[in-house]
Image: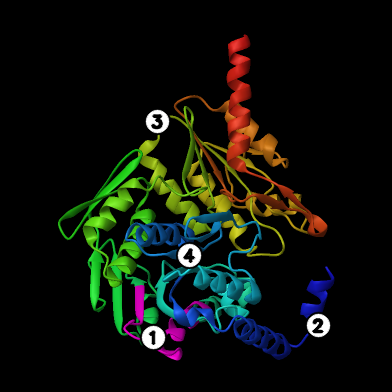
Amino acid sequence: MIKAIVKKITPRFVLKTYHYCWAFFSALFYLFPSRKMIIIGITGTNGKSTTVDMVSKILIAAGYKTASLSSLRFQINDRIWQNRLKMTMPGRFAIQKFLHQAKKNRCKYVVLETTSEGIKQHRHKFIDYDVAVITNLKPEHIESHGSFENYKTAKGKLFQSLSKTKKKKGVDKISVVNLDDENAKYFLHFKADKKWGYGLKDSLIEADEKLIAKNINTIYPQTKFFLNNKEIVINFLGEFNVLNTLAAISVCLSQGIDLDLIIKVLKNIEGVSGRMEAVSKEPLVFVDFAHTPDALEAIHRAIKPLKRGNVICVLGSCGGGRDKWKRPEMGRISNQNCDRIILTNEDPYDENPESILDQIEKGIDSKEKLERILDRKEAIKRALQIAKNEDIVLITGKGSEPLMCLANGQKIPWDDREIVRQELNKIHENKRNI
């Protein structure tokens, strides 16, 4: 609370200067470790963590010592630990320390999930990025940035940084852009030694290299498509995950990794924690991080071919005054795609949880399909109780996040997936006892 008040009354130029100086001194303290490694920055509204995971696994399989940082986890070579910060991109000192540890462990590559909030606070400064990737750009963090254009500009600063840092010996500056995104030209206009573009449809937008997926076919739990006449098989659903895969392939090809090795690694990746993660088969229960309208719509498109019975949705929306505009939109999308909707708590912070649900409910016309259960565990339990074997239960908003953020800075341990397992076990046990 005190921190929020201080931020509100402090002039913006003072805050910017503070963040910039702290970034510089953090890098100086650790002797600018990013200068000795190849740094890959992945930004975008959705798909960042999945793309980070894919790129990291391919680099490791290619024999490179690799570190990575995402909203899901930290990794330095074989050492992996969970990101419990409720912050995708840590503070400046923490990032530089992580880079220092990666350098100390002789990593050649570091893959960083790079957020607009982090860029806004100069957390990307004094990190010498060599590859910049944009997965997509949709409205998010509008209250924080002031407008969509400001949000886009923040993302653009990652690409701008390619030409503002000294080129490392023998290392090209690479940009990788989703050509299907309406903002592709904006990101391609930034200077780079080589520009890669990828997409699902042939694009007239110019790039030095283009990867276009053809003949996409989903047969649960796999998706198959062709690239340069070679079949790619991934254990992910949805066209959005094909795009994430193309982004990862583009990065790895730009680093000279053989496509056949990339294909082999991708086929063996068994999904990403909390990203379209199937926790149960009967009923089919998916847990996903989707917290934006675009991400939620993409998931519904992905599960539509799998529908045999009802789709039962459990969702809420993050509090803390964040992106209130999207709440009725999330309700509208659920209204269009779900047969049953259970609204529940997500991460309310200091906002009134009931008010958050009121705002989501504004987008839901069919009140007969709606229930409100504020206790998230009880909401998940209710969804599983009413689900038949042929139904799909979709639980969105938190994915594999290990904490729930409540009022007054309180954080409690949480895991949607574990709650699903526990409640299903109880249901099965009760059936056996009848």
Mark 4 vs mark 2, foreground winner is 4
Which x, y percent locates residue 284? 47, 33
C-alpha span from label 2 to label 3: 55 Å
Question: Residue beneath label 2, please?
Answer: 9
Decide: marks 1, 2 in contact (CB < 8 A)?
no
Question: Residue beneath label 4, please?
Answer: 67
Q: Is residue 203 visible?
A: no
Which x, y percent locates residue 377? 68, 37
Magenta segment: does it hold 121?
no
Which residue is drawn at the image coordinates 45% and 69% (left, top)?
Answer: 107
Q: Give the mark, 4 or 2, whose residue is nearer the N terminus.
A: 2
Question: Residue beneath label 1, please?
Answer: 168
Question: Residue beneath label 3, please?
Answer: 308
Q: Give the mark, 1 or 4, whose residue is nearer the N terminus.
A: 4
C-alpha span from label 3 to label 4: 42 Å
As drawn, the residue found furthest toward the top would be 434
Which residue is drawn at the image coordinates 50% and 48% (left, top)?
Answer: 273
User: Which segment is the magenta one?
Assistant: 154-176
Q: Disc 4 marks which amino acid?
A: Ala
Decide: marks 1, 3 in contact (CB < 8 A)?
no
Which x, y percent locates residue 322? 66, 64
Q: Disc 3 marks which amino acid?
A: Arg
Secondary structure at badge 2 equals: helix
